[in-house]
Amino acid sequence: MNYIGSKLKLSSWIKDEIIHKINDNLSNKVFCDIFAGTGIIGRTFKKDVKQVISNDLEYFSYILNRNYIQNSTPLNNKDEFIQELNNLPLINSGFIYQNYCLQGRKYFTDFNCQKIDTIRIKIEEWKEKNIIDEDLYFFLLASLIESADKVANTASVYGSFLKHFKKSASQNLVLKGAEFIQDYKKHAVFNEDSNQLIKKINGDILYLDPPYNQRQYGANYHLLNTIAKYQPFTPKGKTGLPKYNRSTFSQKNNVLNSFEELIKNAKFQYIFLSYNNEGLLAHKEIQNIMEKYGKYELKTKKYQRFKANKNRTYKQSSTLEFLHILEKY
């Protein structure tokens, strides 16, 4: 799925740099991705390390990672459940249809709104009746989130919808299984504030990929959170916003203190921070904080910027990605 800050294109470079720095067998290492997003980096390391700890403040991200990271053994009859969900008769009384179609919010076609509701309600019903276990529950929810995102009528983020349905959004939603790596290990996934979680965990490698700017992910992906939680509320404004989480890493007045607190409390030997040259924190600010707690290094890579809107004019077509490295004393 399209995601602001996704490290899909940078994952190989990041992994190579981490392996080069650690210079040791990863199979006995605990790796933590504490701003996991869609879980690309955690997935990249899942087969190689002893355990992945994954976390994100957004609930839809938690669901994705609960499937992609924590699920690690085969799920019985998952394809049969996917098929049954695809063949359900549609309802028109669900929350998404009532609030994001009938109200003129063109995030999805009428058909797709109804199908999202139908599938989401059935998944919850199966869970309540113990027809499915937690692993299968999160697999099905992750499948719905990713399948819905493919037919969303947006420019990649949900801060607004397009006036007219684009080609991909006009397609009927087909639920496809969100496959995961089967490695038979015990991984852990959390849905907490990173600065609170860091006080409760420890490991070997901590990977940080916090928000770079003042765009709040809770607003940009609010509809995926709404599908994930599926709890009634009164949508606000033209885009139907709920109340949403506000990360201190997206607040100019708070980001420096939040960053230092995270580094200070991290019980990990190696810390790797992904950040770019357009972030709220200046390169020197990051370096000064990291050097307080150990040996600091910097790696850089030029890459194509994320474009939520292809028609928007950007000052530069590429940005410079920094990988700040700290080996704690």
Image (tube, rainbow, N blue to C red):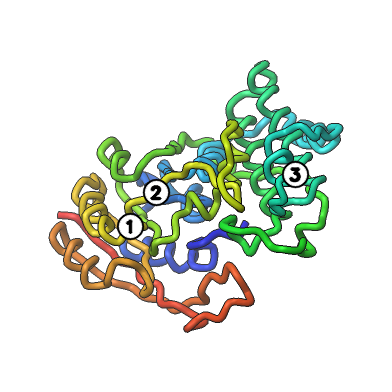
Vertical position of residue 163 compared to residue 242: above or below: below
Circle 1 — which element? loop
- Give the camera-side residue of 20 and 119: 119
Q: Is residue 60 left or right of residue 86?
A: left
Residue density around tag 3, few if under 14, some if 14–19, many if 20 or more, within 10 Å: few
Q: CA distance from mark 3 to mark 2?
A: 29 Å
Looking at the image, is mark 2 or mark 1 earlier in the sequence?
A: 2
What residue sits right under mark 2 in the picture?
246
| Quarter of the image where one finds residue 91 | top right
Residue 150 is marked as: none
Q: Are marks 3 and 2 in contact (CB under 8 Å)?
A: no
Circle 2 — which element? loop
> Horizontal and vertical percent for residue 23?
32, 61
Residue 251 is marked as: 1
What amino acid is found at the position of numbered circle 2 in the picture?
Arg
User: Can residue 68 be seen by looking at this rendering?
Assistant: no
Residue density around tag 1, few if under 14, some if 14–19, many if 20 or more, within 10 Å: some
> Horizontal and vertical percent for residue 196?
29, 39
Vertical position of residue 321 compared to residue 72: above or below: below
- Give the camera-side residue of 210 and 163: 163
- Residue at the image point whose x is 34% and y is 45% from the top: 194
